[in-house]
Image: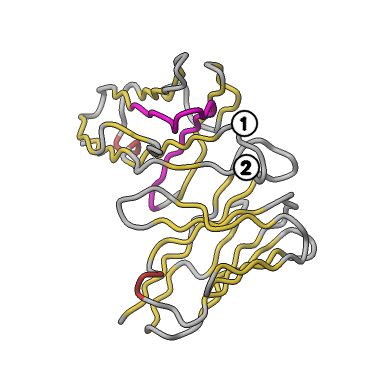
Amino acid sequence: KAGVTQTPRYLIKTRGQQVTLSCSPISGHRSVSWYQQTPGQGLQFLFEYFSETQRNKGNFPGRFSGRQFSNSRSEMNVSTLELGDSALYLCASSLARVKAGNTIYFGEGSWLTVV
Amino acid sequence: TQLLEQSPQFLSIQEGENLTVYCNSSSVFSSLQWYRQEPGEGPVLLVTVVTGGEVKKLKRLTFQFGDARKDSSLHITAAQPGDTGLYLCAGAPGGSEKLVFGKGTKLTVNP
C-alpha cells in the first residue's frame, strides 16, 4: 500500500515568489491536512480538506491556501514568499476527518527554502 | 503559549540507559498521541492513549496518560541507537478538530 506522497521534496524560492506543493494521500483516504514544521515553532496545523472542502484552518495568513481535488489529491500554495516561510511542509492523510484519536499518516514532507 | 509543553527539549544518552520524556498541558485532552520523527521523514504514530491513567506498552516503550488527561509520559527502557529521533506528542484539546503538537524531544542514543 503506497504511503502519502509529497512533491517536490526540496525546493528553493526567492522572496516574493509563490510556490505550490502537492500531496497524494493513501488510496481511499479522504482527509488531507497540512502542517508547517520549523525549529522555532515546531509542527503547526495549516488546514484540513475533506471531500474537496476546507474543514479547518490554522492561524496562518491568507498567503497560505490550499485545495483538494475529486481524487483527494491536495495542493497548497504560498504566495508572496517571505524568509520566515522556510520550513518543512508536511501533508497527512486519514480515512475520516481529523479528530482526537484518529490515525493520520504523514508524508516525508517538502523542504522549502526561501532566499 | 504552547498548548502542549514537552520536556526535555534535548536528550543525549548512552545505549542501555533508561529515559522518560514528558508532555504537559493545562488543557484536558480526550486523547493524546505520540509520534517519532526521524531525520528527513515525516512523523510516524507510535501510540494513542485515550483513558485517564491508561498505560500502554510497545516493546521497550511505555506510554502513560495522566489521570486528569492533561499530561502524558513516554518511558524507554534500555535505549538503543535505533530509538534516536524526535518524539512528538499531539492531541486535539477540548473536542477541537485541530491537532496540536508539542515542540518535541530530540533524543540521541549513542552506541
Q: Quadrant of the C terminus of chain B?
A: bottom left
Residue position for label 2: A102
Which of the 4 image quarters holds residue A8? top left
**Callout 1: residue from which chain?**
A
Residue A77 seen from this side = yes
Asked if the residues shown at circle 1 and circle 2 are in contact, with their CB atoms under 8 angstroms apart, the answer is: yes
Taking the spot 54% from the left edge, 68% from the top edge, the residue there is B7
Left or right: A63 as drawn, with respect to A98: left
Q: Is residue A87 magenta?
A: no
* Residue A61, position as x, y percentages in the image: 47, 26
Stretch in magenta: A22-39
- Label 1 vs 2, first from the N-terminus: 1
Residue position for label 1: A97
Q: Is residue A23 magenta?
A: yes
Q: Mark 1 is on which residue type?
A: Arg
Left or right: A99 as drawn, with respect to A32: right
